[in-house]
Image: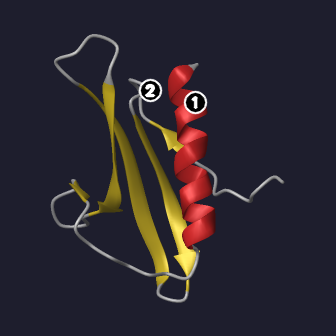
Amino acid sequence: MELQTYDISEGRNSKSFWFTSKGVKGDIRKLVLYQETSIPYLYNLAFGDLNPNSGELDDSIVTDNGDGEKVLATVVSTIYHFLE
């Protein structure tokens, strides 16, 4: 089964990705970051809303935009882009 995903935009360093969730609460920008850890070749996947005021990732917001499956599928799709 292939799930629908949103179109993603990739940052210059291939460690950041963003997309727009479109749902019952409107258009909400999402951000996925791959952050290096102190362990070689181990990265942390950070995901959340893009805070419009600070321009930073906010992982404490629960938007409940009605498109959770599509958002999760999109986050998973960034893994493939990151690993390329």
Q: Mark 2 vs mark 1: give the one in front.
A: 1
Residue drawn at 22 percent across, 15 percent down: 39
Crowd around label 2: few <14 · some 14–19 · many ≥20 (10 Å): some
Secondary element at tag 2: loop
Q: Nearer the viewer, residue 10 or 84?
A: 84
Residue under the image location 74 percent in, 59 percent down: 4
* Vertical comparison of 14 with 7: above or below: above
Q: Please, what is the three-letter code of the amino acid marked with disc 1? A: His
Give above or below for 24 relative to 68.
Answer: below
Count every numbered label the image shows and give the total: 2
Look at the picture and state if 45 lies above or below 47.
above
SS at mark 1 in the image: helix
The chosen color scheme is secondary structure
Could you tell me which residue is drawn at 33 percent across and 59 percent down? Answer: 48
**What numbered label is drawn on residue 81?**
1
| Residue located at (57% from left, 30% from top) | 81
Mark pair 2, 1: CA separation:
8 Å
Q: N-terminal of the two: label 2 or label 1?
A: 2
Q: Quadrant of the C terminus?
A: top right
Q: Categorize mark 1 by other alpha carbons within 10 Å: few (<14), some (14-19), many (20+).
A: few
The residue sitting at the right extreme is 1
Contact (Cβ within 8 Å) of mark 2 with mark 1: yes
Q: Which of the labelled discs sits on residue 23, or is there none?
A: none
Q: Residue at the bottom extreme?
A: 24
**Which residue position is annotated with label 2?**
14
Q: Quadrant of residue 5?
A: bottom right
Q: Amino acid at mark 2?
A: Ser
Residue 44, given in percent of the width and then of the height, sits at: 30, 34
Q: Is residue 66 left or right of residue 1?
A: left
* Position of residue 71 measured from the top left corner of the image (x, y, whole percent): 55, 62
> In what quadrant of the picture does the N terminus appear?
bottom right
